Image (cartoon, rainbow, N blue to C red):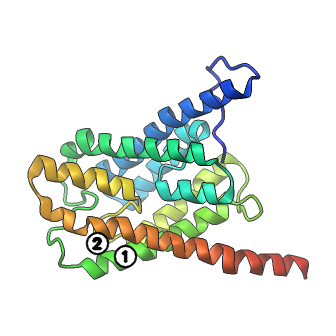
Amino acid sequence: MEPIVNEFSQVNDDSVEKEKAQITNIMVFETAGTLLLIYGALATETNFGVALVYFIGLIVCGRLSGGYFNPICTLIGYIDGSISKKKAMYYVGAQTIASLIAGMLLMPMFAYKQTLPYFERLPSHQVFGTLMSEIAGSIIFFTFIQIQTAENTKITTTPIQSAIFVSVIYFVARQYTATMGNSLFNPSAAFGLQLFYGIYYGKWDQMINLLMYVLGPWIGALLAITFFWKIYTPTLVSKQTN
């Protein structure tokens, strides 16, 4: 969805000024929303808690930024035509900045927790399980994100309904698949948290599985996108014409 202009910004009808205001909102509120989501994963110990924080982020920050909070969700929005290439770059930049800030400032506050996202007691011992978990959860989550992003397949229409729907799907995907490393299905979050975990604590062995936490969501997302465009959409169109 297209980011709206902050109601507190003084914006005239000039399209250039409007675009600048939208980009500002993306950088400010997309960063804040992504940071809030990662904080939720760090602070809460249940998938329901993470989903609830996700919902709050979508309601508070998403209405001003677009509420992607994930480079893969951004890609889906770009493929669907919801956002331009230029804005997609700003989204990914904001999400990356948020992930690095979370790793630098927030992660040390919760490093003692056994539920720390992307932390595994025995790194590399469950590489295949980690990869399959990431792919399975990503297929579930990003399939419904794609369905909800496309105008002709949306399941809900209002922002609140959409936030509830996305949060519930996120809960389900994490509840039944993200069991190996408490994953967020978010490559930028994985990079930021694991990078600073290694820097602060010298636990570079945790970086072994970083490839799984980056590749898994992308593989799952590509499968989800392919399913949507090659199977789901043609089937839906065929049913509507009949």
Tally of marks: 2
Mark 1, secondary structure of its residue: helix
Query: Which labelled disc corresponds to residue 108?
Result: none
Residue 208 position within the rendered picture, expressed as x and y whole percent measured from the top left: 20, 68
Nearest to N terminus: mark 2 or mark 1: 1
> What is the quadrant of the C terminus in the image?
bottom right
Q: Quadrant of residue 219?
A: bottom left
Vertical order, 33 against 169 (above or below) = above
Query: Which labelled disc corresponds to residue 180?
Result: 2
Residue beneath the point at 40% across and 54% down: 50
Residue beneath the point at 53% across and 76% down: 223
Q: Do the residues labelled 2 and 1 touch (CB within 8 Å)?
A: yes
Q: Between residue 154 and residue 197, name the one nearer to us.
A: 197
Residue 207 position within the rendered picture, expressed as x and y whole percent measured from the top left: 20, 62
Query: Which labelled disc corresponds to residue 133?
Result: 1
Residue at the outermost right position: 242
Q: How far apart are marks 2 and 1 (CA)?
A: 7 Å
Residue beneath the point at 18% across and 52% down: 197
On screen, residue 237 versus residue 20, left or right, reads right
Mark 2, secondary structure of its residue: loop
Residue beneath the point at 62% across and 64% down: 146
